[in-house]
Image: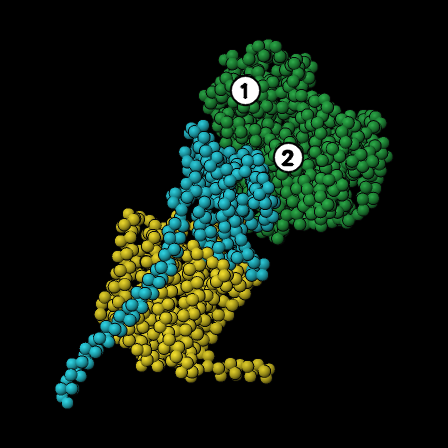
Amino acid sequence: MNKTLSRRDFLKLGAASAGMVVIGQMLPPLVVRAARENGTLSASGDGIISTMCEMCVWRCGVLAKVKDGRVVKLEGNPEHPHSRGNLCPRGQSGLMNTYDPDRVLTPLIRVGNRGEGKFRKATWEEALDLTASKMLEIKNKYGAEAMVFSSTHNLSQVQFENLLYAFGSPNYGTQRSLCFNAMIVANLMTYGMEEPARIYDDKLAYILLTGRNLLEAISTSETSDLSHAIDRGAKVVYLDPRYTKTASKATEWLPVKPGNDLAFHLALLNIIIDEKLYNASFVEKNTLGFDEVRKEVSRYTPAWAAPLTGIPAETIVRVAREFAAAAPHALAHNGWRTSNFVNSFHTQRAITILNAIVGNWGVTMTEADGEESGTLGKPAQPAYPRVSALRLDGVPWKYPVVPFKLGVFQELRDNIVTGDPYQAHGWFISRQNPVMSLPDRGRTLEAFAKMDFIATVDIIMNDTAWFSDVVLPEASYLERYDPLLPVGDRVFIRQPVIEPQGEAKSALWIYKQLGERLGLGDFFQYADDEDYLRQQLVPLGISLEEVKSKGYAELKETPHAGETLEKSWSTPSGKIELYSETLAKVGFPGVPTWEEPPQPEPSEFYLLTGKVAQSTQFGTQNNQLLNKYSDEPRLWMNTKTAGELDLADGDWVEASSSVGKIHTRLLVTQAIRPDCVYMTPGYGHISKGLTTAYGVGASDSVVHVTFTDPISGGQALSQTFVTVKKA
Amino acid sequence: MKLNLRVTENLRRLPITRGMWVMITLMAFAAISAFVRYAYGIGAISDLSNAYPWAFWISFDLYCGVALGAGAFTIVATVEILDLKEFRPLLRPSVLTGLLGYIMVVIALLVDLGQPVRIWHLMVYQNYTSILFEVGICVMLYTTVLLIEFSPVLLEGFKLNKVAHTIHKYSWPFIILGVVLSTLHQSSLGSMLIIEPYKLHPLWWTSLLPLLFFVSAVNVGLGMIILESSLSSSAFGQGLETHLLKKLAKADVYVLLIYLALKFGDLAWSGELNLLFTSGLMSVLFWGEIIIGALIPIALFTRRAVRESPKGLLIGSIFVVVGLMFNRFNASWFAIKHADPLSYVPAFMSHVTYFPTLPEISVSIGIVSAGVLAFTLAAKYLPLFEHGEQAHSGD
Amino acid sequence: MIEIKHKAYLFDATRCIDCRACMVACSVENNIPTDKTRIWLAGIGIKGEYPELERATMVAHCMHCEHPDCMSACPVGAYTKRADGPVLYNPDVCIGCRYCMNACAFGVPHFDYDKGIIAGAFIDKCTMCPQRIDVGEEPACVATCPTDALEFGEREELIALAHTRIQAHPGRYIDHVYGEFEKGGTSYLILSHVPFKELGLPDLGSDPINKITEGLMEETIPFALGWAGVLSAITVGVRAFKKKETMQEEQPAAQETESEK
């Protein structure tokens, strides 16, 4: 029986492993020579260095205080638009990630069986040589496509993709299909862009949130914006089966039945169109397909939606009217994936259409600044080899409208197991944890077993590294350069605050070293990290030293968001496509359509997943600072339901789905629908190299069933149903 | 083998009774607990926490310990100030009880204080707004005074009678000082609770706390004299001075009546009489201490038959002492509102309950055992129950 | 930068999203060990019955009272209140008696129950980050708060701001700024949407709590001297009275014997 720790053990584990840990005193201090020469640090190693956080995807600007060559405090950079001088709890805890006693600081080569955790230390030479030789072996024997590449999008992504394309494999897997495929594809279909930017100004009066627990899934500046909007008196209507902290601040919390957010939004469209509350002139001038939408939603009345959603018809009508009345100072927030069901794609489409027809464009939403480093330079390189092999993740042959850069990660994993249409043999993973992130962990480990070779780049022995053959230690974000990133009209730098500890190296260095050994040196024409950045800065005519000391540089030509005189969207028609021909062409509904979501049996529960402010995905549970202020991970169950099942708060329970079962402690609470249970993802680590996190809580990936939306390729994480009984 | 036999033979030859061995064993447990406390912290042997910074040790060792030593100043005032010479036979044992009691308090504090090595800080770093500072200084000074008052007994034990006589001749200022110091610190232990008006239940909290504590100290002083005499007479085969004790018992009735008048008068004055029966557990605790510590002793000691019987005196004094201890435990622990069971983060802040651990209690029991042992040794080897030179000197 | 004469915090419970960035920031800034904290979350959490629910929590740390009871109660004077606001603790004089923990109405001082006498068992509590405020920065908790639930500034200005905010949003707040007058005022001011008790705050009057005890202490010496005088008078008086009585008894006897002579 796989019993997870009791609360007492949970505390003891944290305390024991912390011992008398004092921040920043874990490892010997080393001084950043360059920063000293630059004058940013004094001779004794004191000073402030500007860099960027990497504790989540928001990448707030950070001012790192250095004393005696150690990072002692992180502050939000007031100059950075994502932080504005604040940092969330994960941002504040960042130096504990760097000084985590469990850091992997030398390359490791496996000696035992996979999953035993037996590694030996190796030199970079040996580890890189081994990795390259294995990758070439696979390439020569089975073709480049037999090598799978995975990363979590981050600042060094551009060089990761460089490696991927140069190697010639089409197989790229990333967590996006576990997150926001539905949202991106919907926006692409409607607006021709991945995600519009949202504008929170003083006039914003009405916000409709579908999931997107912004006050717990913190994106510092946007969380701040939402909070200030609420403070000012803006109305927030929030759909979530769970009473989250966002629910507690929202003006109205609607505990929607999971999977039925779609019905709610279709009914909103029904009312707004039927009662002619939409912005007719805007629709006329800028959109396409209004009639098709009107025809489709005419049957989705509030009375129809009420029993499906569990929200009274009067409420739906009222929200529709309030939303339209507040427009254009209203915002229907796309979130990441709304209810996380297969039908969420249609929900996302409905939300984009909702914003469009009331004319919010240009007021509360506008074109976002790209994350592409378009205005920056890059090293010269030859053309990439042509890739003719099919992608293992079914794009586009099974998923015709999923963009290549999103992919369908869970499909990739499944086809590694089935070997269909061909067998993959190797996996190069950088800064990602598929063992924890992909649904159905058992199946992921099956996929690992099919691999001849697995190499992982990470800063710590996370669960994927635990099952790898080679672990390459990356320097943490406080120890490395990453490619420059434009944010708004500035380009911000990530630069080392301290020298990398042990043998850790930046991804820029690792990819280049690997690339050279793979015979792809021409694609990595930079001498070192600083040289790369200098080449990026060439078009701007600014020196690297200037950027390092200031923390950013102004861009010369600024693609200002929303300043275009002519409204135009990058859709095939150039207009906002309420009806998408692109979708219709390949046989998908061109307008959002009702798709009945599956329901659990009376003895089953919806298994919800969500976010907490004290962790990010699967990578921060080992951070002792966050661990100290985290709630114990437990399975939430409604008080009444628990009473009916004769379960009490703190009981050990077993939750089982069709693919796995977990043991965890129960939290009996009023804050969740009676037909749902919830667990915070990211716990239940199986790597013993994570001494703080190992054995704490249970993993949702063990019980998650793989359901893929055929349109967007998004994984429906909340479509898993579980039974719960006393353990 | 030979060595072992000799050791055990020698041990058997020592005049240590079985009872004394029990005391020594209890002291040993206390010493071990104390050692662990010094090595690993207070939390290693007790259930004290941030929610319960004071509990068993302070209530028992400090509050009860000081109160139960009140017999000393009561008998000194009776004999030396009010010049009621007939009570002189009770003087020495009561002074010793007091002295041992105060020494036990100091030893207990050396375990309870976070920095016992720094106990001398009270003499150098002084905060004149702190009631605890006053208590600390008074206890230090008074223990010295008690030592001086008791020194003649020690000196006579070592046959230094002349020195003993000299000390006694010039002990007047110390006698006055002793009573003043006792008044101050017995009442200040009550004053210490005044700073917790929102934590201590209104049935106990009042600005009259110092007066109430002083009056109840006089009461338990009388009770302790009676109790100690009763126990000593059966333990050491001394005769019981019933003719003296019955007068003390009668006096105690008046003291208790004054106490009740003050207590209930104050509640009436503050408009809190309605809380007497409507405060749930607090009402039970309140009436418990009043009934056990005041009403029953009054009922017993107003009856001559009880006052004049050794058994009656013993039982009555037990009620007085137990009732007073109940009061001290209530005022310093049970009636104090500790942290509410709110939702706390981090998790280690959620420990808001308390129950004394065995090692924790063993420390107090061991200290009390040491006191009893010391008293027994004094009874055996010192002229504790003699009247000594004082019988004929003084005027 | 405008110099702040009397520093204070303003906490707005409606803005706090319980993210705990403040707590992590404080731990890092002040090098707090993993099993200790100077700042914590209190409150009843979620109240009500599904789906009529409400949430009430508060970030709690030292209130930096105007009339600190810890300072009044500490026998060795380990606490001081700086003129500009912070109540500071000096571990060098502390004897670990923990009276301050009883005296504090808010349960602020925390103690090292896990340290023996060699490591030293001391109190720990929020210091208002003097190392930051003395160089013009805000305390670590305030600086990082993403929703401005924690604000810092001049006490009187914050009180005015708080009242303005209450008036600007009728029905949102309890019409009271906690800490404005409680026990003579504190430098941690709180705005709340629920009764303050539900945030874990005690219901206090506006008189400083230590008024009575400090008054008692002031009377100690005069009382002691007076009481000593009374006792001395009694001692002498009782004996004089008795002597007079015995003399009176002896006199007639003496007269008798004399007359017998």
Identify the mark nearer the N-term, 2 or 1: 2
Q: Position of residue A104 (x, y in %)?
A: 72, 46
Do the residues marked 2 and 1 share a common chain? yes
Front residue of B271/A324: it is B271
Q: Looking at the picture, does residue C223 appear above or below residue B236?
A: above
Confirm whether residue B148 shows in the render. yes
Q: Which residue is mark 2?
A: A77
Q: Residues within 10 Å of mark 1 (few under 14, many from 20)?
A: many
Q: Residues within 10 Å of mark 2 (few under 14, many from 20)?
A: many
- Measuring 53% from the left and 38% from the top, which residue is drawn there? C4
Supply the letter of whichever chain is yellow: B
Q: Of the residues tagged 2 and 1, which is closer to the observer? A: 2
| Amino acid on which disc 1 is placed | His
Supply the letter of whichever chain is cyan: C
Confirm whether residue A186 shows in the render. no
Figure colour of chain A: green
- Measuring 34% from the left and 53% from the top, which residue is drawn there? B207
The answer to whether marks 2 and 1 mark residues whose Cβ atoms lie closer than 8 Å is no
Q: Position of residue A435 (x, y in %)?
A: 68, 39
- Measuring 54% from the left and 23% from the top, which residue is drawn there? A202
- Chain at tag 1: A
Q: Say which quarter of the image contains residue B159.
A: bottom left
